[in-house]
Image (tube, rainbow, N blue to C red):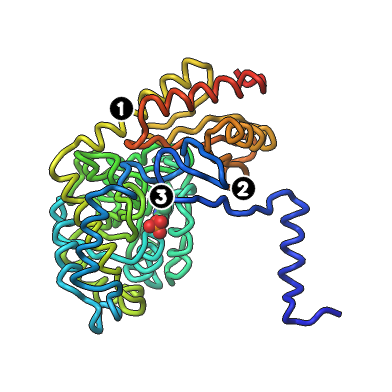
Amino acid sequence: MSSIHELPFLQEKIQELKDQGVYRRLPILEGANESEIVLNGKRVINLSSNNYLGFANHPRLKKASIEAVEKYGVGAGAVRTIIGNMDIHEEMETLLATFKREEAVMTFQSGFNCNAGTIQAVTEAGDIIISDELNHASIIDGARLSKADKTVYKHNDMNHLEKVLKESRDKYRNILIITDGVFSMDGDIADLPSIATLAEKYNAMTYVDDAHGSGVLGESGRGTVDHFHLHGRIDFSIGTLSKAIGVIGGYVAGSKTAQEWLNHRGRPILFSTALPPAAVGAIMEAVKMLMETTEYTDKLWKNARYFKEKLGKLGFNTGHSQTPITPVIIGDEAKTMEFSRTLLDNGVFASGIVFPTVQKGTGRVRCMVTAGHTEEQLDRAIAAFEKVGKEMNLI
Ligand SMILES: *Cc1c(COP(=O)(O)O)cnc(C)c1O
């Protein structure tokens, strides 16, 4: 018999992963996350990052980050409620609130723990959380931490959402509707105007996780709420500072009341150390850059349109994306993974995404176009898609 310290029950599960062909090793990036990278020793075009605006290695962010380190050091030193609350944290939140055109902002150490901390703080037993079936894992985990009841509605299906609201209204005290702003696997946008209207009809609160809309949609990347001009009608507007903003962190933008409550009951605020100065400095610089100019978001959308149009002309199915997220839908799982591997051999890194992350038979290679790509890089990527697509009889 093996010893408990060899974790036999985990070894067994790992073996199962290997048997199913889903065991993986993490690809290793040598250097900064940019549009062209060295991955596992090979130079490739990067179509897999969430670095939408090319900010992750931007000279202005790096400079701001270094300056913040020189003045404030490398760590906040404590949770914010004890002594970790620096003037730059407050400044960052004021700046973000101005940018987002909301009353107040509460920041968290990541988008993930923003959801984990906020959902449980604003719901309790006797409430119900109504969630889009395709919402992100961190929303699912966040909802699990709440004592409220939970239910899901069919993806972006407003008739189904209304049916659930109708059934729930009299049974519960508060209702919280949660949706991603932009859905990460298909690039489609939530029907927020209808959600806001239904929420008002049934006296429910609204919560939008705009991880993939922040820095992408709305005026100069102000997000999905701004895109639809719904300011004041979405109670909790969650953004991430880790994707388009290029750094790390998450936040809730909304009312002063929401900010005050999370300041007292957001568990990651109370029990996890504040964002490091390096991150705060870089985040503020990124937001200032977006407030100065739309050139970054303009370039992102220009590149995304260019890439999508070329792939479409080649005969690839790019689904119903409304954002720079560009799925190339292959269908069969094994074929999808082979397509992704062969693209990599041809100098393009685009992740294959298959069941259970997406529905069976809808395997896709997901391309993330960024403002950092040059037209020449996009052309090279498109040429690789054409070559491999023809070799594999996909087009
Ligand atoms: C990426 C993502 C998160 C997590 O954000 P991090 O800042 O990376 O922790 C949360 N929600 C959605 C919808 C995401 O896509």
In the rendered view, would you say 32 is above or below 36? below
Looking at the image, which residue is at 61% across and 34% down? 345
Quadrant holding ligand 1? Answer: bottom left
Q: Secondary structure at mark 3?
A: loop
Assign the N terminus to one quadrant of the image: bottom right
Q: Where residue 133 sits: x, y (%)?
A: 49, 49
Q: Is residue 121 visible?
A: yes
Measured Cα–Cα span from mark 2 to mark 1: 32 Å
How much space separates mark 1 and mark 3, taking CA atoms? 23 Å
Q: Is residue 40 left or right of residue 83?
A: right
Q: Report which residue position mark 2 lands on.
A: 356
Say which of marks 3 and 2 sits in front: 3
Q: Which residue is mark 1?
A: 302
Q: Where is 137 relative to 192, above or below? A: below
Task: Tell me: is circle 3 under 8 Å from ligand 1.
Answer: no
Amino acid marked by disc 3 = Ala
Residue drawn 46% across the image and 61% down it: 150
